[in-house]
Image (tube, helix red, strand yellow):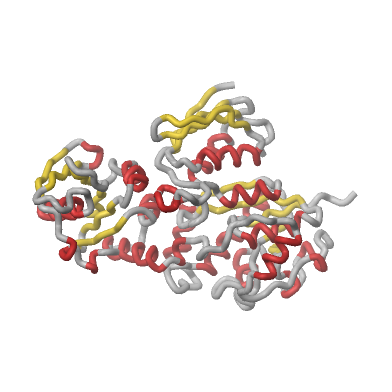
Amino acid sequence: MSKQRKAVALVSGGLDSMLAAKVVQEQGIQVEGINFFTGFCVEGHTHAIREKDRSRPKRNNALWVAEQLGMKLHIIDISADYKDVVLNPKHGYGANLNPCLDCKIFMVHKALEWMEANGFDFIITGEVVGQRPKSQRADTMPVVARESGAEDRLLRPLCAKNLPPTLPEREGWVDRERLHDFSGRSRKPQMALAAALGLEEYAQPAGGCCFLTDEHYSAKLADLWRARGERDYDLDDIMLLKVGRHLRPRPHFKLIIGREEGENNFLEGYRRRFIHLRTLGHTGPLVLVDGRVDRDDLELAARIAARYGQGRSAAAVEVQVEDPGGVLSTILTVAPLPPHEVAESWHV
Amino acid sequence: MSRHQLDARNLLCPMPVIRTQDRVATLAPGDMLEVFCTDPGALNDIPAWCRLNGHRVLETRRDGRDVVLVVEVGGEER
């Protein structure tokens, strides 16, 4: 009796990785999924704290995919090691601060480590030749296999027939003829395959799975690096870039202003780290102050906080200013900043 | 068999699941883990992760802003 072969699939929660895992499962291979958490993931329900996104299903799509396919899923936090990929991408950035090729190499390398530690035989990804401009080109896909160290233990079932046979194909663990030859940006072949496999529901592609491909998010990260005088971040920094309105009225500080209750609640969790402001007597946002501020800066911050609250038309508004942890508290009475005095250039 | 607590408040998806997963890996079959979250998505995600990995959710409840889940550790975790 031949040995039961085992594959580990990189599962993003999107259609391609779902199909890739399913295609290999169909050949009798035991497949388990890995979902890597970088801190920049759009996947999941980061947006669920916002009211306008409440209608979206609050589910983690990678977990949902694993349940649909009946396979285990291991969610692994690689955010600490991933920092070096973001800060020093050997192959450079894409259109924004997205280090896509280095990212793919890194993730496949991490999957390889997991595969070896857990006695699995090969790695599956949902890559398709020509689908992405950086990491999924005919000339960069071999780079991923080589530089990750996975070499021919990396199988891309959706486009395998466009690539040289890998170890699982040569060894007969999987039948190459039952793999696919997809290429290019069209997603019609994937949708047809999903239908053929009986997969009726799947996450719709919606602008990628990483905030670093987003122009506005990348601008906020670049602003953070400029303001701190160094290219560095921690996990809280990058989570906060996903939440609230970010205004930098002075080079040495910025304000993170909750746009609604859900965001205010989330920002509440950071009151121990930042000076924070809230209006008294009028409903208003929670505002975090990121940077070093003096009395004049705090007065300006209070006027801005008042401008985004229900008291924006009042002659004067009381704003409570608290140190991190709420040990020291001051109340400033300020005139809300008129909208035309909120410079466009302040918006990060 | 013992009872443990995990504070996963103010973490966004998938961190509550990751913290649960990592903590469960240190516990013995039959142990119970009470997980406190503020991300309401945890109500879907942690049970899904438990179903996939052979654990049981004994209880879910809301407590103010908190979402609380009680997980019983199964015996199949690698």
Image position of A98 (left or right of A11): left
Q: Residue furthest bottom?
A: A139
Give the percent coordinates (x, y) of residue A115: 67, 53
Q: Quadrant of residue A188?
A: bottom right
Residue occupying image coordinates x 35% and y 48%: A263
User: For this rendering, which residue is in front, A130 or A38?
Assistant: A130
User: For this rendering, which residue is in front, B50 or B60?
Assistant: B60
Give the percent coordinates (x, y) of residue B59: 55, 28
Q: Residue furthest top?
A: B1
Q: Assign the C terminus of chain A to one quadrant of the image.
A: bottom left
Give the percent coordinates (x, y) of residue A320: 17, 42
Q: Is residue A145 visible?
A: yes
Image position of A154 (left or right of B14): right
Residue occupying image coordinates x 71% and y 49%: A119
Residue occupying image coordinates x 42% and y 64%: A87
The number of discs equals 0
Image position of A22 (left or right of A84): right
Residue occupying image coordinates x 14% and y 57%: A337
Image position of B51 (left or right of A48): right
